[in-house]
Image (tube, rainbow, N blue to C red):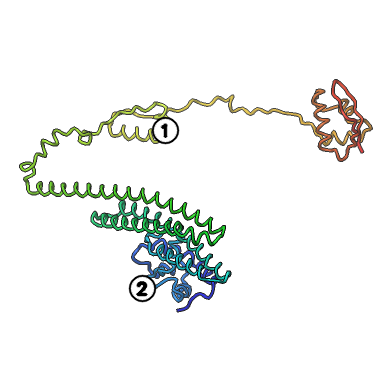
């Protein structure tokens, strides 16, 4: 069996076959994934499938393929899609923390002591992350079991098993809290590390969050078990009723008729029907409504010829084309005339003969527009004059 020689080769292989692995991961719950399906996703190149088989990324069983357990577990954990509640992993990490604490105290070398301290911090981070993930997986598995398991006995057995998992997680949380509390006066005070203090605070917050969620999960499990018990008792009673009915002794051995007669529950009442009057505008304008009216008319055969109302003819006045002309002032032409003159810009515009009537206010506006657009070819002086209560700068062509 070949293995990947480095991370680059592993990531490259997973990236190249991401389409195949993604499809196989989606269908990991199915009984089989045909070899022919995989060939379609690798462009019918058998060597690409053999490459994954040789490196144990996927496995072959006859004509079926499946993702190897090691990679499948990795994908599920990273994507948080795993269903297995692994409490032993938390316990192993707790033992690992205890061992590294002992190694830390026994080690005289500061560099090696730091290595043990680093392992302890990483393990504590793992404990918090894994515990949170197990609580989330536990809640999801409880919901899926109650909603999707069709057999009542299996549903009850699985919920009881998940409840035991909840108890195990609660015990491990208590052990973790005891570890970081009892050893606080020894290790956590001796190993004065700022990062370790942050890790401990973060871990306590995660464990507190897990504890609150486990309380809600316990309440949910109790509620689900009570519902299962009630549903199973109802089904058992229905089986007895069906047996008595099949034996034609239901009416003689039970008081079912008198009980049903005295029951006034709404479920035994006929469904009420309400007439809904539609507006004439809706019936006239909606295509589906008109089609329904035609169907009803054919069924009734009333002899009435239904025609959709036709709008009146549009007046010819609305169809006449009207043209409106507007004379625009060509600023480029005005600029060229000013450059060729010897006047200042304001007096030039006041005396300029435009193609249409232009008021004094509009000429002042044109004065401002010309300065803003052609200031590079104008000489704007610091001399000012005033006309009709408007103060303006003396502007000349360069």
Instruction: Determine whether label 1 and label 2 are within 8 Å by CB.
Output: no
Query: Disc count in the image?
Result: 2
Question: Of residues 53 and 134, which is closer to you in this image?
Answer: 134
Q: CA distance from mark 1 to mark 2?
A: 60 Å
At numbered mark 1, what does the secondary structure look like: helix, strand or loop?
loop
x, y percent for residue 83: 37, 59
On screen, residue 155 versus residue 190, left or right, reads: left
Question: Of residues 337 and 97, which is closer to you in this image?
Answer: 97
On screen, residue 277 versus residue 255, left or right, reads: right
State the quadrant of the N terminus: bottom left
Question: Of residues 81 and 178, which is closer to you in this image?
Answer: 178
Residue at the image position 48 percent from the left and 61 percent from the top = 124
- The disc placed on residue 286 is 1
State the quadrant of the C terminus: top right
x, y percent for residue 340: 92, 35
Q: Which residue is mark 2?
A: 61
- The disc placed on residue 312 is none
Mark 2: few/some/many CA within 10 Å (<14, 14-19, 20+): few
At numbered mark 2, what does the secondary structure look like: helix, strand or loop?
strand
x, y percent for residue 236: 17, 49
């Amino acid at each position: 069996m070949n293995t990947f020689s480095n991370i680059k080769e592993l990531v490259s292989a997973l990236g190249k076959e991401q389409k195949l692995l993604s499809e196989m991961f989606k269908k990991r719950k199915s009984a089989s994934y045909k070899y022919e399906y995989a060939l379609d996703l690798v462009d019918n190149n058998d060597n690409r499938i053999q490459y994954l088989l040789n490196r144990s990324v996927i496995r072959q069983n006859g004509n079926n393929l499946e993702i190897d357990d090691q990679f499948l577990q990795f994908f599920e954990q990273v994507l948080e899609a795993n269903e297995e509640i692994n409490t032993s992993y938390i316990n192993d990490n707790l033992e690992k923390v205890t061992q590294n604490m002992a190694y830390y105290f026994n080690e005289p070398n500061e560099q090696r002591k730091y290595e043990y301290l680093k392992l302890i911090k990483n393990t504590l981070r793992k404990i918090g992350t894994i515990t949170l993930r197990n609580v989330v997986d536990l809640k999801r598995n409880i919901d899926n079991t109650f909603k999707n398991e069709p057999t009542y006995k299996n549903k009850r057995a699985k919920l009881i098993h998940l409840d035991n998992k909840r108890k195990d997680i609660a015990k491990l949380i208590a052990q973790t809290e005891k570890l970081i509390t009892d050893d606080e006066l020894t290790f956590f005070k001796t190993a004065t590390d700022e990062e370790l203090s942050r890790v401990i605070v973060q871990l306590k917050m995660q464990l507190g969050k897990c504890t609150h969620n486990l309380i809600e999960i316990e309440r949910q499990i109790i509620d689900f078990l009570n519902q299962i018990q009630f549903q199973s008792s109802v089904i058992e009673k229905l089986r007895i009723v069906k047996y008595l009915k099949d034996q034609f002794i239901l009416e003689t051995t039970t008081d079912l008729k008198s009980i049903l007669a005295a029951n006034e529950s709404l479920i035994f009442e006929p469904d009420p029907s309400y007439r809904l009057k539609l507006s004439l505008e809706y019936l006239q304008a909606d295509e589906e409504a008109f089609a329904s009216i035609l169907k009803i008319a054919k069924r009734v055969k009333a002899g009435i010829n239904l025609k959709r109302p036709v709008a009146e003819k549009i007046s010819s006045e609305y169809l006449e084309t009207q043209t409106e002309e507007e004379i625009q002032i060509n600023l480029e032409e005005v600029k060229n005339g000013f450059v060729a003159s010897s006047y200042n810009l304001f007096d030039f515009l006041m005396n300029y003969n435009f193609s249409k009537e232009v008021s004094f206010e509009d000429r002042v506006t044109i004065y401002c527009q010309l300065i803003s657009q052609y200031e590079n070819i104008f000489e704007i002086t610091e001399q000012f004059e005033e006309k009709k209560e408007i103060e303006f700068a003396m502007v000349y062509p360069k």
